Structure formats: C-alpha cells, structure tokens
C-alpha cells in the first residue's frame, strides 16, 4: 500500500537492526485517515470472504482492526493482555512472547464474543516473529471458529513470522512488506525486486 509505505518512509524511525518505531501514526498517536484507508484496503484484499468478526490483540492492533471492522461492517474483538475484574471466567486464553518487550503476555477473550459460528479475520499492526498471531490462532481454535485470513499492517519479511503462517497454509496479506533496515532506512520488499 503506497500510502502506508510513504508514511513509514516519512515518519517511521528505525531503531537498531530490527525495530521500527511508528508511534506518531499507528501505535501511540493514530492517524484516522490512514487507518480508514487501511481498513478499506483490507476489505479489498479479503473481498468475498464471509467474515463475521475481526480479531486483534490490544493495544496497537486495535486502531487498524476497528477501521477494518467498519469497512467489513462486523464487530471487532481484541484479546486483552491483562486480567480485568469484569472478565474472570469463561475465557479463551493463550500465551504470547513479545520480542520487543521481552516478556510473556497472557492474552484472553471472553467466550461470549467468539464461537464456532464465527469466520475470523485477524488484523495486527506488525508481523515479525508471529507470536501474537499464533496466540490469536490458538484462541480461534479453542473457540471452534474458522480463520479466514490474517491482515498485517507492517510485515518484517526478514523475520520468521510469515514463514510460519505460510507453512500452515494461511492466507496472509500485508500492507507494507519490509525487506530490511539499511543504514537507518527502511527498504521495502518491492524495492529489492523480490516481490
């Protein structure tokens, strides 16, 4: 998605060899016009899929998921990373490791929001090592729901997440695919002629 790639080039900040900071438009401050465009693009990419729910993990996946839900006209459910006093029992849960924060997160979703009748599209902000998506897939399996696909805002193709999902035959669409970070700059996959 050219609009997203341009925004990453303009406002993204490369930190080290494998971290991209996009807090000024995606995961701290949110650009709603960009989110709306991304929601419409996910709708186009998964056109025809009988999606009944959008699923994501709090918190950075919520904005793109909500705008995708708006485009699909379906509810959005997000997995909580922290226990809530109002959500105690009847939960689906999984453990996911955050490479960015170097911690295990226990994610959970109330059973009343996901069931065997649901056809799910997972939306997340980043795909790197695939841990967040794997956790959501575990929850989808627990619910007996059916996965229709995975939509990723920014994919780091030099990490193993996509490979893990491809091995499982999962339909994955990424709006921006990063091949590398070189000298503090983002190199997109199509710039490397690997598309």
Image (cartoon, rainbow, N blue to C red):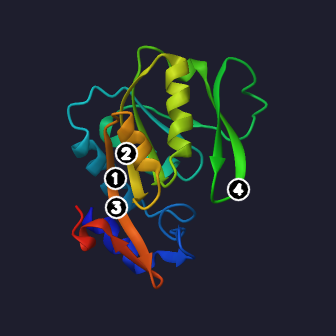
First in sequence: mark 4 vs mark 2: 4
First in sequence: mark 4 vs mark 3: 4
Separation of residues labelled 4 and 3 (CA atoms): 24 Å
**Label 3 secondary element:** strand
Query: Marks 4 and 3: CB-CB under 8 Å?
Result: no
Is 155 placed left or right of 134 in the picture? Answer: left
Q: Which label sits on residue 174?
A: 1
Q: Within 10 angstroms of label 4, few (less than 14), some, or many (20 or more) residues? A: few
First in sequence: mark 1 vs mark 4: 4
Rendered location of residue 17, percent (x, y): 53, 73
Nearer to us in this view, 181 or 65: 181
Nearer to us in this view, 7 or 179: 179
Q: Which label sits on residue 153?
A: none
Query: Marks 1 and 3: CB-CB under 8 Å?
Result: yes
Instruction: Name the residue that disc number 3 marks.
Output: 176
Nearer to us in this view, 20 or 193: 193
Q: Which label sits on residue 151?
A: 2
First in sequence: mark 2 vs mark 1: 2
First in sequence: mark 3 vs mark 2: 2
In the depicted structure, whether residue 66 falls above or below residue 22: above
Q: Within 10 angstroms of label 3, few (less than 14), some, or many (20 or more) residues? A: many
In the depicted structure, whether residue 15 falls above or below residue 34: below
In this figure, what is the number of numbered marks?
Answer: 4
């Amino acid at each position: 998605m050219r609009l997203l790639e341009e925004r990453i080039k303009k406002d993204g900040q490369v930190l080290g060899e494998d971290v991209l900071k996009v807090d000024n438009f995606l995961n701290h401050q949110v650009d709603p016009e960009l989110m709306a465009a991304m929601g419409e693009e996910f709708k186009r990419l998964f056109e025809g899929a009988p999606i009944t729910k959008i699923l994501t993990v709090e918190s950075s996946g919520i904005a793109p998921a909500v705008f995708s839900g708006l485009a699909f006209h379906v509810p959005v459910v997000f997995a909580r990373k922290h226990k809530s006093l109002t959500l105690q029992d009847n939960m689906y849960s999984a453990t996911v490791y955050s490479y960015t924060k170097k911690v295990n997160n226990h994610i959970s979703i109330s059973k009343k929001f996901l069931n065997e009748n649901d056809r799910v599209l997972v939306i997340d902000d980043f795909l790197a090592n695939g841990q967040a998506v794997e956790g959501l897939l575990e929850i989808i399996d627990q619910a007996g729901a059916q996965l229709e696909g995975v939509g990723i805002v920014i994919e780091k193709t030099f990490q193993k997440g996509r490979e893990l999902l491809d091995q499982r035959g999962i339909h994955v669409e990424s709006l921006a695919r990063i091949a590398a970070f070189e000298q503090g700059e983002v190199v997109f996959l199509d710039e490397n002629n690997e598309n």
